[in-house]
Every structure is written in structure tokens, then in C-alpha cells.
Amino acid sequence: MTSIDSAQVAIDLAHNWHPFMQMKDCETYPPRRIVKADGIRLFGETTWYYDSISSWWCNVLGHGHPAIGAAFTQQWATCDHIMFGNFTHDPAIALSQKLVAITPPGLERVYYSDNGSTAVEVALKMAIQYWYNHNQPAKRRIICFDGAYHGDTIGAMSVSSQGPYTQRFESVMFTPIRIPYANEDDTLAALETVLTHHAHTTAAIIIEPLLMCAGGMRHTSVAFYQQVRALASAHQVLLISDEVATGFGRTGSLFASTAAAVTPDFMCLSKALTNGQFPLGVTMTTEAIYRAFYADYTQQKTFFHGHTFTANPLGCAIANATIAALEAFDWQNQVAQINTQLTHGFQQLANDIPICSHPRVIGTVAAIDVHHTDNRALFHMAQRGFDHHLTLRPLGNTVYLYLPLVTARDDCAHMLELLRQVLQSLIKPR
Ligand SMILES: Cc1ncc(COP(=O)(O)O)c(C=O)c1O
């Protein structure tokens, strides 16, 4: 580390509390100071890293995208922040119109918040109140799938998989109906049984379609998602699709729901919505849901929820620019090319490295399981990744790349080679 790095990092450690981290580990592995982000690279004072997990699964178009920067600057000069209660503004009007046009047919209403967890909270609360407004207050339970992750606020955590991250909060979370996730057939059978017995007390099912990300980059099929949709409809239960991580081309279609031709009752978006450049969350829903809240004030059907930064104009302008830039770019072919490279590369890793198995790739997301007797080895792996210019954050024993859609062929090949070196170093002493 340079002296500037050490001095700045010392101040960081004197004040900052970093997410998901045991701060004591920073005595050994202090955070790396980034001074510039450009394209798919992050630069420190003396070294650089590939943004190989898209800055927590957000970045699709690279950092420093000029059109996004220009949109931000222009919006800032025009109208930076106003409240979205009583007021509206052009960036939100344009963004909602665009989102309605590009998401599955039937999603016609847009509710803004700040991040992925709040987008999920909004969907959960709307689903519960929808039934209340329809004089069916008993329908208030939520069905979720084991292995899913929907965020870290209390409601989102309640419907996520339970484990070390959530166990301290058990007493304050609500209890959903959890469907064990083993294989698709058994899971669907379990879901059907639960719906048969509990649909009358269930408001909604929540799902991460096609890809359960934080749960270990587990794939589920288009048919599985379609069956969940069919079961939800058949049993009069709403369907919430959490596309916070899968939206905007990540899995090869604009949305996972587009690939499956499924219209959920709620779709949650965030992350790549702004290319990761502004905190913004969206919960889209149908006209039918919206209408259940539309009444004289005295009927008490209003959705009383909101956030200070709801539909912040800067965020909406950035989202508009992100979607425009995505549409102007041949992302389908680019994702297909990255996907082919990753599929071949991860298969080779599984063939060549004895501790690696179960390679799986969807869109620009590639994962592999690593078997190691030292359970801290994968924790140390993030550091080995940095030493090899890679950003890695293994999920349990799953190591993955989650590449920006603009990743060039040579960079993808380089990252695969670097990952091979990192994985091989796990079977050799350091
Ligand atoms: C599928 C999914 N839903 C919700 C969230 C929560 O989003 P946020 O971290 O913005 O609160 C995440 C975050 O990784 C996610 O992957």
C-alpha cells in the first residue's frame, strides 16, 4: 500500500463500518481503497481490479458511461431532488412510461423506492393490503422458497433463507411459509400442497425467477417459473417476482419474466436499473392491484408507504439514460458471446481442477462449487482474487463471476485465466 492508501484506510477503519464484514478481519485484510472506476476496471493508487461481480450485481454498462454522466449532470442542473408526494417530474414520468413498455404486458403501475430491499417491502405490503382492501384480511401470509434472498430489511429478511445472517433477528421477523427447495418437481409438489391447504390465508408467493443469486447462484428453469405462476393464479394467490438481480439483460433476456413470458403481479427492480449509479428501487404492479387501492379516502384503502427519496429525479434520469444506453447497444449478442466463453471456461475449470464441480452459467453469471477442507479458504479467496486483479466474494462454497454486459472477449478470457490461477492456488500452499 502507498502511504496515501495507508493513511486514508486508517481513517476509514477509524470510522467506517463496512457491510457484511467482521471488522476485526480488517486487521488482516483492510479494505482496498479505490480512487477511480472506469469501464469494467476499478483502480487503486498502485493496482487495479476487474469489476468481476459488477459492483454487487449492478453494473451492466461499465463505470463512467458518458451518456449516464451527462444525464446526471443535466438533471442536477435542472431539478435535483423534490418530494414525490404532491409533486411529479419529467424523469419519473418518462421512466414509468418506459418501464411499462419494456416489462411484461400487464405491469402498468410503478411505485418507487430506494433499493432492492425496499422494492421487496413495498411488494409485500401491497400484497397484504390488496387482500385487506378486498375484505379478505385473513390472506396475509407469504410463501417463499428456501435458498432465496430478498434483502436485509426485516420484511425482506423474513422471506429470505434463514441462516447466520438472519438468526439473531428471529424474534422480530414474521413467519412465512417456507417451501424446501430440493428439485423442481418436489418443490412444485410441495407448493401445490401448501396452496391447497393455505391459499385462504396466503397473500402472495415471492420468487427470484431463474436465478437464486445469494443462495449460491442456483438455476431454476423457465418451466418452473411458469408453473409457479400457474399455481399462484389457480389458487388466487399473488406472485411477487424479485428481479432486483436478474433485471436488465443479466440472464440473457431483458428480464427473467420476459424469458418465461410470465407476468407476475409484482415485479421488483433495482441494481442495474441505474447501472448501479444511483440508489433506486421500483415495484411494478398491475392495474387490478392498483384499483384495489383506488377509493374515496374515507374507505381507508390508501397505500400508506413512502420514502423521502422516492422517485428522486437524479435517480430517474440516470435510469432513463441507462435504459436508453442499453437499448442502443447490441447487448443480446454481447451477452450470448460472454455466455459462450463462460460456459466453455467454467467447464474447463471443473475438468481441470479437482476441487471444482457443478459449473453453471446463465447470461453473464457463471458459478462453480469449490470443495475445500479449510472452511476459511474461501474467505481468504477474496484476497487471493485481489492479488490476481479479480473481485471475488464467494457465497458459501460457490465462487462466481457476474460480469458487466460490456465485458470484451479479451477481458473475459483474461478473467477466466486469472480465476484458474486463484482456484489452483487453493490446492497448492500459498
Ligand atoms: C434478488 C435480490 N433481491 C433483493 C436484494 C436486496 O437489494 P438491496 O441490497 O439493494 O437492498 C438483493 C441484493 O442483493 C437481491 O439479490
Image (cartoon, rainbow, N blue to C red):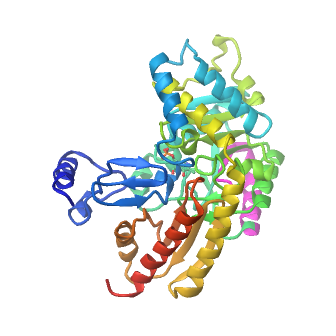
Q: Is residue 386 visible?
A: yes
Q: Say left or right for 271 vs 392.
A: right
Placement of the N terminus among the 4 image quadrants? bottom left
Image point 50% across, 75% down: which residue? Answer: 417
| Residue 194 colored in magenta in the image | yes
Residue 95 coordinates in the image, percent (x, y) = 64, 28
Residue 138 vs residue 166, the one in the foreground: 166
Name the residue rendered at 25%, 46% in the picture. 16
Quadrant holding the C terminus: bottom left
In x, y percent, where is residue 384?
A: 36, 72
Could you say which is closer to the camera, residue 290 or residue 369? 369
Relative to 14, 35 lies left or right: right
> Residue at the spot x=46%, y=57% of the render?
51
Q: Which residues are magenta?
A: 185-209
The spot of residue 243 in percent (x, y) is 63, 47
In the image, residue 253 sits, relative to residue 76, either above or below, namely below
Q: Where in the figure is residue 302, as x and y percent of width and height?
A: 62, 20
Main secondary structure type of the part rendered in magenta: helix
Q: Is residue 95 above or below residue 65?
A: above
Q: Is residue 380 above or below residue 299?
A: below
The quadrant holding residue 403 is: bottom right
Quadrant assignment, res 344: bottom right
Residue closer to the observer: 189 or 96: 96
Q: Is residue 150 magenta?
A: no
